[in-house]
């Protein structure tokens, strides 16, 4: 993906959606890498909601169990 600056509208979407939206989905929506999404969110002090973190952990645990 080529580098480009963040537009105001993209930052607004990130601020509104980052806490409760999976990073991969935001990356697709905004046309940016997951690394770029996480870096900008960290710079802005954004955090995922505890509910989303729990959902992600639960999904990862289930995936590992199925792989066995």
Image (spheres, helix red, strand yellow):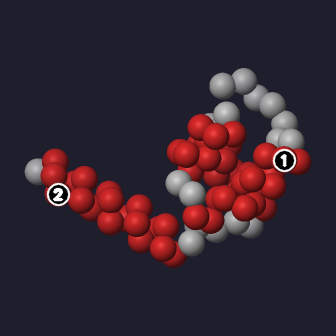
Would residue 8 be seen by someone viewing this image from the given angle?
A: yes
Label 1, label 2: how many angstroms apart (C-alpha)? Answer: 40 Å
Would residue 42 be seen by someone viewing this image from the given angle?
A: no
Residue extending furthest toward the left: 68
Q: Position of residue 14 (x, y in %)?
A: 72, 54
Q: State the residue at coordinates (55%, 45%).
A: 25
Mark 1, secondary structure of its residue: helix
Q: State the residue at coordinates (47%, 68%).
A: 53
Along the viewing direction, whichever of 41 and 15 lies nearer the viewer: 15
Along the viewing direction, whichever of 28 and 60 lies nearer the viewer: 28
Sequence-wise, which precedes: disc 1 or disc 2? 1
Q: Position of residue 30 (x, y in %)?
A: 69, 39
Q: Quadrant of residue 45?
A: bottom right
Residue tagged 1: 9
Residue extending furthest toward the bottom: 50
> Is residue 44 found left or right of 52 in the rendered image?
right
Q: State the residue at coordinates (69%, 51%).
A: 39
Whether 24 is drawn above or below 63: the answer is above
Q: State the residue at coordinates (27%, 61%).
A: 61
Residue tagged 2: 65
Mark 2, secondary structure of its residue: helix
Which numbered disc, 1 or 2, marks the residue closer to the eye? 1
């Amino acid at each position: 993906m080529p580098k480009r600056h963040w537009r105001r509208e993209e930052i607004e979407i990130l601020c509104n959606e980052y806490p409760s939206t999976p990073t991969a989905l935001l990356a697709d929506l905004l046309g940016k890498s997951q690394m770029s999404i996480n870096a900008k969110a960290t710079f802005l002090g954004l955090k995922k909601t505890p509910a989303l973190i729990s959902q992600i952990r639960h999904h990862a645990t289930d995936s590992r169990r199925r792989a066995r």
